Amino acid sequence: MSTREFAAVILAAGKGTRMKSDLHKVLHPIGGRAMLHHLMASVDELGPSRTVVVVGSGREQIEGAVSGRAATALQEPQLGTGHAVQQAEADLADFSGDVLILYGDVPFVRPATMRRMLDRLHEDDAPAVVVLGFEPDDTLQYGRVIAGADGTIEKMVEHKDANEAERACRLCNSGLMAARGADLFDLLARVGNDNAAGEYYLVDAVNVARADGRKSAVVVTDHAAEVAGINSRGELAEAEAQWQAFRREEAMAEGVSLRAPETVFFSYDTKLGRDVTVDQNVVFGPGVTVADGAHIRAFSHLEGASVGEGCEVGPFARLRPGAVMEKGARVGNFVEMKKAVLGEGAKANHLTYLGDAEVGAGANIGAGTITCNYDGYFKHRTVIGPRAFIGSNSALIAPVRIGADAIVAAGSAVSRDVGDGELRMVRADQLVKPGWADRFHDAMKKKKAAGKG
């Protein structure tokens, strides 16, 4: 395996008009993460010395998305893929390592595939350029790689410029390439645009090297899906489905039970422990961690939440960012948590909102309880002590503290602190008027019969 340093050049200058979106194509998410960031995460696993993203249309969005992680180079006007790579030359002027060329809308290239390309540069025959090839079920409009049995490339040709014999070749060009930094920009400087599109093709670097008497080589991936480009909403949906299917299989292989796998949706950073059970129609947004033995019941939505060992969530529960459930805690149907901690063994089983709250171990939150955390200007915190009992349909008006072992009677609106072991009942006196309802009904029936209603 090569230990040489390398730089990644990621092409993301295209307009992405088929997306019909104000959001740049490569920033559309898959599994909750922009496709460009999926690709950059894979590159980062190999430890690049530099990363340069070539931008064009929508450059401000890309520059913001990669700030602090990569340099950007502007391609304007856009004269083809070879011209796009040339825009990174200034950022790599003093760089002597290898250069890996990738595409921002081809997000699923595996680190192992990238490493194979870089390693191939340094085999005994020392190819000038390494191209990543693949054999799709349908060759469509892909450019072809005409190669010998040993993987040496005889010719690269775009589909629109290929003759019938060349189009019969099933080995296609993914567009991904690797070359030594010392060679790459010299080769690109000699690429012409005498072709059907009048563009400077990146693949012509191979043909220039061949004219110099130098060999280039192809590395073939047997996972055609990893080089699939995403150019439309339909292709984005297909990529999402592909990614979700892979992630479900991965989760089950790691010891997670999915009751109806096709209905569970993950995010790129979802972490599930062993013996976790996930029922149907569960959505994991970004930032969710679920510990061993937890059970996520049907139709629950979690984002930015931490679920502890042996916890139960749902059905129909919503955990928002900052929700933390400690060991053995439980939230049931139509319970929402936001920036709240539910202590060990604590329960909120029905129809409850816990926002900006801390609930102690073993506490019981009755049905319909609400922590009233917002006064129209600021958020305030509610603290509920261990083993406290909050009766049904209570409103806890923050900031407020409920002490350990305290009881809040059902239907109370609590706006002042409750001490340890106290009972707090905040209700108006019950008024009883015997016979009033019967008299009311009689009067209303007579009024309706007289046509006065």
Image (spheres, rainbow, N blue to C red):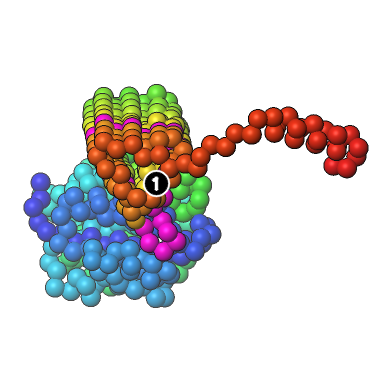
Residue 204 lies, in percent from the top left, at 33, 62
Residue 367 lies in magenta, yes or no? yes
Q: Nearer the viewer, residue 36 or 248?
A: 248
Image: magenta residue range: 357-379
Q: Quadrant of residue 314?
A: top left
Is there any visible trace of residue 33 in the rendered image?
Answer: no
How many C-alpha atoms fall within 10 Å of the one at disc 1: few (<14), some, or many (≥20)?
A: many
Residue drawn at x 53%, y 36% is: 430
Q: Percent from the top left, x then y, of residue 305?
A: 31, 43
Kind of element beneath mark 1:
strand
Q: Nearer the viewer, residue 432 or 25?
A: 432
Q: Looking at the image, which residue sits at the far right? A: 450
Outermost front residue: 434
The reply, left or right, for residue 300 in relation to residue 9 is right
- Residue 89 is covered by the magenta coloring: no
Q: Main secondary structure of the magenta part?
A: loop
Residue positioned 38% across, 67% down in the render: 61
Mark 1 lies on residue: 414
Residue at x 51%, y 60% (from the top left corner)? 21
If the image is split into quadrants, where does the C terminus sit?
Answer: top right
Pinpoint residue 148: horizontal percent, then vertical percent. 27, 44
